[in-house]
Amino acid sequence: MKIGDKAPEILGRDENGQEIKMSDFKGKKLVLYFYPKDSTPGCTNEACNLRDNYERMLSKGYAVVGVSVQDEKSHRRFIEKYQLPFPLIADTEHTLVETFGVWGEKKMAGRTYMGTIRTTFIIDENGVVEDVIGPKQIKVKEHAEQILG
């Protein structure tokens, strides 16, 4: 997915098994952020920064949805532990990460593996990708500020 592409209507299922669709966000901009793993330091910092600025984001017309490949149970624990006010899609089949092109080779501690590449897509009120904030640009402790500008 790149700027100008139309996001798919069906995004996936959240931590409670509820289907999340683009049409659920009609009239709002959607911050669809992909992150590697629940409860890891960078992902926790990013989620908590979005949580702490959530009301401000809502007031500016944004909705927020996180996506990772962990299951619903993992997402529920993550949400409860950090009081996250937004849904997390459990993309266990890797459908969304592959559609958006954020599943790829990663390197850490000398090993190479496949994983989610931290990326945020700003999708406009018509379901079109308006902006992409890539892994080298994202500052996990200041992410809401990067989105709001």
Image (cartoon, rainbow, N blue to C red):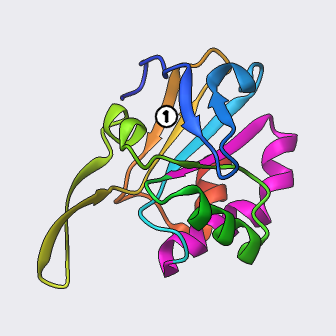
Q: Is residue 21 magenta?
A: no
Residue 58's image quarter? Answer: top right
Looking at the picture, how far across and down is residue 45, in whole percent?
Answer: 59, 74
* Residue 43 visible within the image: yes
Residue 52's image quarter? Answer: bottom right
Looking at the picture, how far across and down is residue 22, in whole percent?
Answer: 63, 24
Residue that label 1 marks: 131
Looking at the picture, how far across and down is residue 4, in whole percent?
Answer: 43, 18
Left or right: residue 82 versus residue 129 is right
Q: Three-letter amino acid code at disc 1?
A: Asp
Q: Which residue is located at x 72 percent, y 77 percent?
A: 81
Q: Which residue is located at x 33 percent, y 55 percent?
A: 117
User: In the image, is residue 122 above or below residue 142?
Assistant: above
Give the total of numbered labels. 1
Q: Which residue is located at x 63 percent, y 14 percent?
A: 126
Q: What is the quadrant of the N terminus in the image?
A: top left
Q: Element type at marker 1?
A: strand
Residue closest to the far bottom: 109
Residue nearest the viewer, comparing 122 with 66: 66
User: In the image, is residue 92 above or below residue 130?
Assistant: below
Q: Which residues are magenta?
A: 40-67
